[in-house]
Structure formats: C-alpha cells, structure tokens
Image (tube, grey):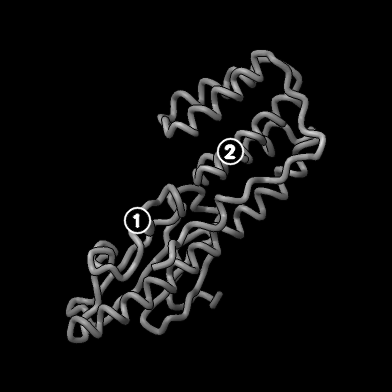
Amino acid sequence: MPTLIEQPWRKALPIHKGGFPVTFSAQGLAAWGYSWILSLGILMKQLPVILLLLLSGCGDPEDQAAIIYRAATRALEIREPLEAEQLLTRIIRDYPETRVAPRAIEAYEEFEQRLEGIAVSALKRIHAGQERFRVQRDGRYANALLELVAADLVEAELSAVTLTRYRFRISASHDNFDYIVQAILIINKDTKKHFFVDRSGIVRWKRGTNASQDSPEV
C-alpha cells in the first residue's frame, strides 16, 4: 500500500545559492541546537520555543529571519509540517521587511497547497476504503477511521494529525449503510479550507468552517 505522506516533507524549502550569513554566535548555536532537537525527535514544545526566544533577542533581524527559515526547512525535511508552519508564520509576521520574507511567503503558500492536496487525497482514499469495507461487511460502512485502519484499508498515518493538520472524522448513519467524512483542521480553523466527502465520492470544501453536502466541489 503506498504511503500517503511521503512527497511533501522530503522537499526542503529553497535556500539562496549564497546561503545566509550565520556566524559562530548565539544565533548560530541556537539554530544548530534547534535543528538537533528536531532531528532527534525531541519535540517537547518548550525547548524549541526557548531557542527561538534566544534568536529573537540577539543579532541582526536579517540573520534571525534566515535562521528561522532554515529551521522551517529542517522541520519539513523530518516531516514536522505544523512546526514548519509556525516558523514560516513567524517570519511573515515578525520580519516582513527582511530579504527572506518574500521567500517565506512563497514557501508558505506552496505549503498550504500541499497540505490541502494531502487532505483531498486522504478523503479519496478513505472513500475507496469504505467501498471495499462495504463489500467485505455485507453492505455496512465503517463508523470510525480506526476500523478502516484495522481492516488494512487505509494507512494508519491518516490518524496522525501532526502530519496532515487535519482530523478525519467518519460519521456513519444509525444502521451504518451511509456515512460522511469531514476533514477538520486542528489549527487556524477560521481561515483555512475544510473538506468533506460522502459515499458519492465527491470531495467538497469550505473556508473557515466545516464543509458539508451543500459546499462546492473541489
């Protein structure tokens, strides 16, 4: 079975050919520390925040923005999209006049499109899994994502909200002969796209709130 989440996080954000000026300083040490924390999988929120606070309190804003951009690149490489989103947002919000800000905006927009594409692909896979499940179970549909995972019909990764930024919620009818699936954002719910699919297989979307059968098609 192909892995759902394998393409986007292997592609690092583009770095300027000349690189960014990072000297052996408090900023540089903090950036290296941040990368090592991510690489080792020690994603306890307090440690990255402390290191970023060190960055914000010393050095030139250009250097600070460049270091945070590199940290966002590293977060994508090790498949931590939520961490990357927070870092890119920090650059756009706190360092809008720096040289790296336009690249951060471009990367953020591309990042959003990738995550939305992952959500749509996931809903299509869940729909396909539901149809196979129905054939195996005398016409009834699964009433929870874990039921499809247990039947080896969808990837367990779909339940990893930190990888997709969406929670995929199946709501089955009382007799389990009908269902809907909602892709619900776990952060920034008021500004991003939400998605929906039912047994028709048509994926729909709505910005800022849960999508439904009345929402436009993707």
Residue type of the residue flagged with mark 1: Ser
User: Residue 159: which disc?
Assistant: 1
Where is residue 15 shown, x and y percent of the image?
Answer: 73, 40
Residue at far front of view: 1
In the rendered image of this protein, does residue 67 appear above or below residue 141?
above
Q: Which secondary structure, mark 2?
A: helix
Judged left or right of residue 30, residue 198 is: left
Label located before the other in sequence (1 or 2): 2
Where is residue 30 shown, x and y percent of the image?
Answer: 59, 20
Residue type of the residue flagged with mark 2: Arg
Disc 2: which residue: 74
The residue lying at 31 percent from left, 67 percent from top is 170
Q: Quadrant of the C terminus?
A: bottom right
Q: From the image, state whether disc 1 or disc 2 is nearer to you.
A: 2
Where is residue 183 shown, x and y percent of the image?
Answer: 42, 63
In the rendered image of this protein, does residue 125 appear above or below residue 25?
below
Judged left or right of residue 25, residue 50 is: left
* Label 1, label 2: how far apart the Cα atoms are: 23 Å
Give the camera-side residue of 105 and 156. 156
The residue lying at 40 percent from left, 29 percent from top is 44
The residue lying at 28 percent from left, 68 percent from top is 152
Q: Are marks 1 and 2 in contact (CB under 8 Å)?
A: no
Characterize the local packing of mark 2: few (<14), some (14-19) or many (20 or more) Cα atoms within 10 angstroms: many
Q: Quadrant of residue 43?
A: top left
Where is residue 197 shown, x and y percent of the image?
Answer: 42, 74
Q: Quadrant of residue 193?
A: bottom right
User: Residue 207: which disc?
Assistant: none
Q: Quadrant of the N terminus?
A: bottom left
In the rendered image of this protein, does residue 7 appear above or below residue 49?
below
